Image (cartoon, rainbow, N blue to C red):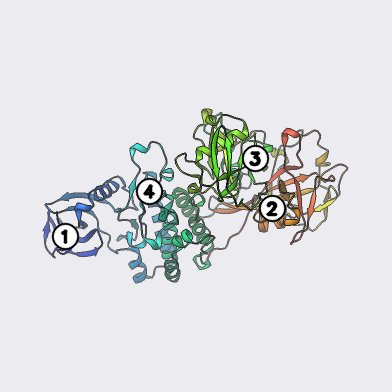
Amino acid sequence: MGNLESRPLAKNQIVNGYEIVGRLGTGSFADVYKAVKSSKTIALKRFKELRLHVPDVLAEIESLKIAAHRNVVQYMESFADENTIYVVMEYCEFGDIEDYILSKKPNIKVRMGFIQDIASGIAHLHGLKISHRDLKPANILVDNRRVAKIADFGLAKILSKTEGMKSLEEMYMETMAGTYVYMAPEVPKGHYNAQADIFSMGIVFCCILDEEVKESIEKELVGLKMHVAEGYTYTVPAKVGAFMQRLITQMLQKDYHLRPKAQEISKKLMQHGQKPKDANLKSLKLLAAGMSACLGVEVRPPGEASSSSQQKIKLNDLFHFTKPVLLNENNPQSSKSKTVDKTMIVHDVSDIDILFRSVGGTTGKAKISKKASANEMRRLVASQMGIPEESIELYHRRWEVDDDHSIDKQGISQGAVIHVHSVKKDKGTAHYEMDNDLLDPSFNYDFTGIDDDKKFIRGGHEYQRPCGWFRHALKVKGQYSDDVWLGDLGTRTHSTAGEWPVSYHGSKITKDNTPIGSAQAGLQNGIITTPSLQTVAEKYAEVFEFDGKTYQIALQNRINPSSGHMVIISGDGPADYWLSPKEDPSKKVNDVRPYGILIRRISVTDD
């Protein structure tokens, strides 16, 4: 088998019964021809320099064989002659999607249809544990029904049987592959997984939606800039529409843990195209989706978890998962070492602080080198929690921490929250269930139709009622030594004796955006809240999507106003901020007591 590049197939030449019509395209490794057999038009791919690429060719054929789907180019057969291997595929009349858009100038409905097709195809491939690794407009074809199909699996990777039950997202590939313009930032490191396809798909979506955006984003080399320039981010142009701007922004996150998975993207796109349903703010599934968004772990409604032994989210867990600890942003400038369970962990100038959380258990902070292994981190966490390391599994942003790779390669950086799960029967799980006693629906209140300008006082401090929100009441009566802190029941504008003030908390109130300055450096361990729901909604409340609609979620609390328990910090908006000590149930310190979870639908105008 020699170099076939200088010997293209001639028009009308017969190859295994296929008559060549003409050449559709040529690349580094193969030529593609239009051919006809028994009146059926097909695409015939002929590989060149085959001696160097037999494993890749066989891998591409295997990917095509198992990837049958409406949005993947159909494989028909393959055969060989004395020189090379041929692959027969369906013929896509309109060529690649870039040519189609330039020639046809389709409207936004057609473009969004293509985007849904691509997302559906990638979700299908990832479900089969196939990573494409070279997603770009040239590898997306359009058939005569104007359906977009993913093609060219020359760089595709199939999860091997030897890698067991790992998901495709957990499988790391050690070789760099792809096209620079569409390449994810982790790919040049030679350590990446299927989430690299998600980044490439985000760039492709920009290219499909608008020709000017395509030109600018291709010149920007977004992934490579993220790789070399610390702190660089790309702002998706607003002209692509609010919905797609939000979605693509998520897909183009530098940290692949923060990118949605292919199935989530496909689902969001399908829901976006459907007729909106009336929002049911009382829905526990909606509430669980909101809690999942701000807690960083999957939360399910009561009774919907897969196991009766599933770990539960209880009342005193709510603030454990909203990053209440304000970390020191200054890392040490000299090397240090620490011995944990007789194992030396060497820390260098890249030391980071991590937070660890255990539902119904410990909350803590630890310092570790970002080059440390996951096993080293497990030993450190287990030592601080005083439990055997073999009895826990660690999760970061819904992903199980991989024992085989250093923590920095898994997106664990300064201020990361590590969720500690009990192994037992729950080994491998990454979700929680709301405890049956978490909610008290009898005290739910619908504020969505209320818009008042009355002054409401609780605990001697004015606060804003949550007008426009629905409140899911938490079961708090009888949970503490008394119920005086709640005040008298009923609608009233005045305070009652012994009650605590009302405040609000958003899960984004962290070290990065709190108004705490150097003067409050000694107040690093605490919870920031404010009596202004407007401030929380504008800056700190988590935004999430559910059933194709967009929502916000926040906590409504009472805080201890006693001297030494409440530090007032001047705010830059309509109200001050309040700093309260971090809760510690073991010491009966509960200075911030959430009694309601607030949900509201927000209107997002799309172009």
Which one is earlier in the sequence, the residue at label 1 or at label 2? Answer: 1
Residue designated by label 4:
174
- Quadrant position of residue 309: top right
Residue designated by label 1:
4
- Which is nearer the eye, 200 or 458? 200
- Quadrant position of residue 593: top right
Cα separation between marks 3 and 1: 63 Å
Between label 1 and label 4, give the one nearer the viewer: 4
| Residues packed near mark 4 inside 10 Å, few (<14), some (14 to 19) or many (20 plus) | few
Cα separation between marks 4 and 3: 34 Å
Q: Is residue 429 above or below residue 275?
A: above
Q: Position of residue 453 (x, y in %)?
A: 79, 58
Cα separation between marks 1 and 2: 70 Å
Residue type, mark 1 in image: Leu
The answer to whether residue 450 is left or right of residue 375 is right
Residue designated by label 2:
448
Q: Position of residue 586 (x, y in %)?
A: 72, 33
Which one is earlier in the sequence, the residue at label 3 or at label 1? Answer: 1
- Quadrant position of residue 162: top left
**Numbered circles on residues, count:** 4
| Residues packed near mark 2 inside 10 Å, few (<14), some (14 to 19) or many (20 plus) | some
Marks 3/1 in contact by CB < 8 Å: the verdict is no
Badge 4 marks a residue whose secondary structure is loop
Residue ID at (63%, 48%): 281
Badge 2 marks a residue whose secondary structure is loop
Residue ID at (50%, 60%): 244
Is residue 304 visible to us here?
no
Which one is earlier in the sequence, the residue at label 2 or at label 3? Answer: 3
Residue designated by label 3:
364
- Which is nearer the eye, 474 or 258? 258
